[in-house]
Image (tube, rainbow, N blue to C red):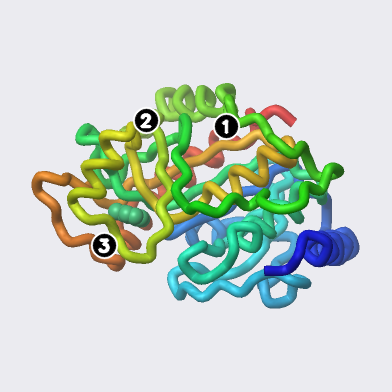
Amino acid sequence: MAEMGEYKKQVDECVAWLQKKAPFPPDIVIQLGTGLGDFADSLRAEAVFPYTDLPHFPESTVSSHSGRLLFAEVNGRKAAVLQGRFHFYEGYSTREVAFPIRVLSLLGAKTLILTNAAGGLNPLYKPGSIMVFRDHLYFLGENPLRGENIDEWGPRFPDLSTPYHPGLIKLVLDSADRCKIPNVISGVYVCIPGPSLETPAETRWLRDSGADAVGMSSIPEVIVAKHAGMDVLGLSVVSNINDPDNFQPIILEDIIAAAQAAGTRLAQLLLEILPNIPS
Ligand code: HPA
């Protein structure tokens, strides 16, 4: 892992590169997870950068995640869309996982919207439910802010008493109601390292610790976004339900198919909320 000084240099170089090449400084960052490629493909992008062109961007090793950064005006909002993310289980440090968010925060983005696919732990959830993060549990064991703090980026001990912006949570729930998009609920996301999936005993324990959905991504990005002073909204498509008393094998192809099936509702929700996000 690069030392903090080296990491900062890499971030600064990527920011400077994008300041030259990006069509506009983004207001909102949207990071798309499994199954949401169609949303990115539907955008009229003003610029598209493969991650391999971006200085010091990590390279995605997961075939179900393509790696592109798009700049597009979406429903009147200037958005940077990250299609594809990096995961701790790929071997990256959590600081590397969050590299794109650090860079885009320094380009001026004020809001981060994350989407992913997750396993449902709450017995009331169904495959295809959309869970808005109300809070999280972080079990990766490596904080992306560990090491020397860069004071110009944020405080040494960032407050996480309100990790997810209450106004944005309400906006999603109200928009779902108004547009009659079913099965949108708020809950607690737990981030585990993976890549092995959970055992029945681990599933019971995670459920008992107050988690409603489990996944292997997103929270390093949340921590860095909060450090950078951004407002954060997290959205999971519940792709499978994990019942510790009747545990079924979890199959990647099923996760991708379920996330894609719910993708249309999630895209509709995103388009609906974007104009109403405070700038
Ligand atoms: N567990 C962990 N990560 C996941 C799952 C799951 O059941 N489903 C989708 N991502």
Q: In the image, what residue type sits under mark 2? A: Ile
Asked if residue 18 can be seen in this view, the reply is: no
Q: Identify the secondary structure beneath mark 2.
A: strand
Q: Badge 2 is on which residue?
A: 185
Tell me which label, 2 or 3, sits earlier in the chain.
2
Q: Quadrant of the C terminus?
A: top right
Q: In the image, what residue type sits under mark 1? A: Pro
Label 3 C-beta lies within 8 Å of the nearest ligand 1 atom? no
Q: Residues within 10 Å of mark 1 (few under 14, many from 20)?
A: many
* Above or below: residue 87 compared with residue 156: below
Q: Residues within 10 Å of mark 2 (few under 14, many from 20)?
A: some
Q: Residues within 10 Å of mark 3 (few under 14, many from 20)?
A: few
Q: Badge 1 is on which residue?
A: 163
- Circle 2/circle 3 CB separation < 8 Å: no
User: What residue do we see at 77% from left, 37% from top?
Assistant: 155
Residues 138 and 279: in front is 138
Residue 126 numbered mark, or none = none
Q: Identify the secondary structure beneath mark 3.
A: helix
Q: Quadrant of ligand 1?
A: bottom left
* Above or below: residue 33 compared with residue 233: below
